[in-house]
Amino acid sequence: MASIPPSSANQQSVVVGVNQGSSHPLQESERESIDQQKISKIIHDASRGSKFSNNQEFKDRILTRKIERLLTRKRQIDRADLDHQLRLADDYLAELELSRDLTQIIVHADCDAFYAAVEELDRPELKHVPMAVGKGVLTTCNYHARKFGCRSGMAGFVAMKLCPNLICLPLNPGKYSAKAHDVREVFANYDPRFEAASIDEAYLNITKVDPLKHQDLEGKS
């Protein structure tokens, strides 16, 4: 299947999170309770002097210079007369509005914390403790781990500093591919020509989905 998503310029787009048994996403109150300053300090202290830290500092310097250039450009634009450009932008937006086609309903389905959710299906007890998939680098983690500041792409030793009780499981690509196949079979029931964007993500055109069939599928899930 192609990995290029359908164009969304002239179609309705609906984003759907498909939870494969993982913990529920963090609520607003839970996100606010996370001490981001503390997490940042732990990450900084744990990675100080490492290749990762040096690379991040290099990226930060590049980003700082880029921001300075953008701010300089913004100050120049602020002093300019933009009436003509604004009129052109309004005309272009009106032209785009006339060409929109809202007859198609496109759904973007993305499984939530997919690797972690698959592991939790085999070991339900992991749903209630901080856990992640990946040893050297975390590929994903459940929401209990995210409360401690752990996240995908984080070095494993840094994650352990943030959450000493974190359970890190090794990658099992075969298991995830098998479960992805099961998920795609569900997608195919709604749109046989769905576009896979990754192992756990796809775009579906559900414009012609039969509501009665849809109810039957929900009853079986």
Image (spheres, helix red, strand yellow):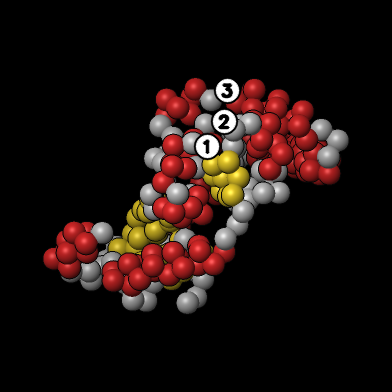
Judged from the image, the secondary structure of the residue bearing numbered disc 1 is loop
SS class, disc 2: loop
Label 2 Cα neighbours within 10 Å, binned few <14 / some 14-19 / many ≥20: many
Give the residue displayed 17% in from the left and 64% down from the top.
216
- Quadrant in which the C terminus appears: bottom left
In 3D space, how far apart are the residues under numbered discs 1 and 3 (Cα atoms)? Answer: 17 Å
Give how far across and how far down residue 187 sits, in percent. Answer: 34, 67
Per the image, the residue denoted by label 2 is 148
Which marked residue is nearer to the observer: mark 2 or mark 3? 2
Q: Position of residue 122 (x, y in %)?
A: 44, 54
Q: Which residue is mark 1?
A: 130
Instruction: Name the mark nearer the viewer: 1 or 3.
Output: 1
**Where 89 falls versus 195 (above or below)?**
above
Q: Residue 161, which numbered label?
A: none
Q: Circle 3: is it few (<14), some (14-19), or many (20+) Cα within 10 Å?
A: few
Pointer 3: what residue?
35
Q: Name the one closer to the observer, 76 or 120.
A: 120
Q: Residue at x 68, y 31 (%)?
A: 161
Front one among 101 and 215: 215
